[in-house]
Image: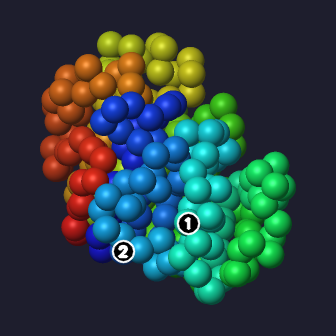
Amino acid sequence: MKVNVLGSGATSPSSRRACASYLVDEKYLFDIGPGSYMNLMKAGLDQNMINAVFISHLHGDHVYDLGVFLWGMATRERKEKLLVYGPKGIAALISHVLSDANTPVSFLKFDIETVEVSAGDTIHGGSVQTAMGEHAAYDLIYRMGDFCYTGDTRPVLATATLAKGCKMLLHESSFPARLEKEAHTYWHSTSVDAARIAAMADVENLILVHISPVQEVNAAEMLEEAKENFHGRVMLASDLAEFLF
């Protein structure tokens, strides 16, 4: 499997990071945050190769490039159906994205099939399993093969259970450990939280994601403290990075 990082940031894009978006095997897109489409273009990847989008939750930094991707696919003459999975409300979101921007469905020459997902569902022909994170919005954790992605969540046992034995866990790491109280208050995880979940899950590789513009100055600190608490391989995601496993 291959993971292309289209957005490693959080809250809003910075000069270095778009918001959350991860492309697996050039076919499966996990979250679709602002700035991610531009990074897809920079990476020389083809949006029309994507056959399924998996949305973790309906916060703006995880969905705001949805319209951009749809327009990009339309202008590049996509014909194949696009599957979009997400929590309750995902179908309404797509409808609003189109109608609020005065875009008739006929502008899209391809069909969109939306599938509303609940935690514990097995989807996409049995190839993707889900669990529930603990966030201010309903958050889905996804596992596809040896890849697991948390979306936004406090540290929860459900992640460790779902990710058990994975080769790669992308776990949100919004704050350094010294800001644990703030992280948990705002329904997020620290780098140490991510490392401890990775250790519980016995994964091979931990990728720290969801680095906000405010916390970018602490990124090196977060990486080091994660390494101190997890003895597998730990990496800090950056835009346009590519991971093979």
Q: Check the image and report above or below for 102 versus 127.
A: above
Q: Which mark is residue 72?
A: 1
| Left/right of residue 110 with respect to residue 25 in the rendered view | right
Q: Check the image and report above or below for 109 versus 240.
A: below
Q: Quadrant of the N terminus?
A: bottom left
Q: Amino acid at mark 1?
A: Gly
Horizontal and vertical percent position of residue 236 = 24, 41
Q: Which mark is residue 25?
A: 2
- Picture quadrant of residue 25: bottom left
Residue closest to the eye, 216 or 71: 71
Rate crowding at label 2 as few (under 14), some (14 to 19) or many (20 or more) other CA atoms within 10 Å: some
| Left/right of residue 114 with respect to residue 31 in the rendered view | right
Horizontal and vertical percent position of residue 164 = 38, 59
- Contact (CB < 8 A) between labels 1 and 2? no
User: Which tag is nearer the camera, tag 1 or tag 2?
Assistant: 1
| Residue appearing at x 68%, y 37% in the figure | 137
Residue closest to the eye, 208 or 53: 53
Tell me, what colour scheme is on the image? rainbow
Q: Quadrant of the C terminus?
A: bottom left
| Left/right of residue 145 with respect to residue 52 in the rendered view | left
- Dot 1 falls on a residue whose secondary structure is helix
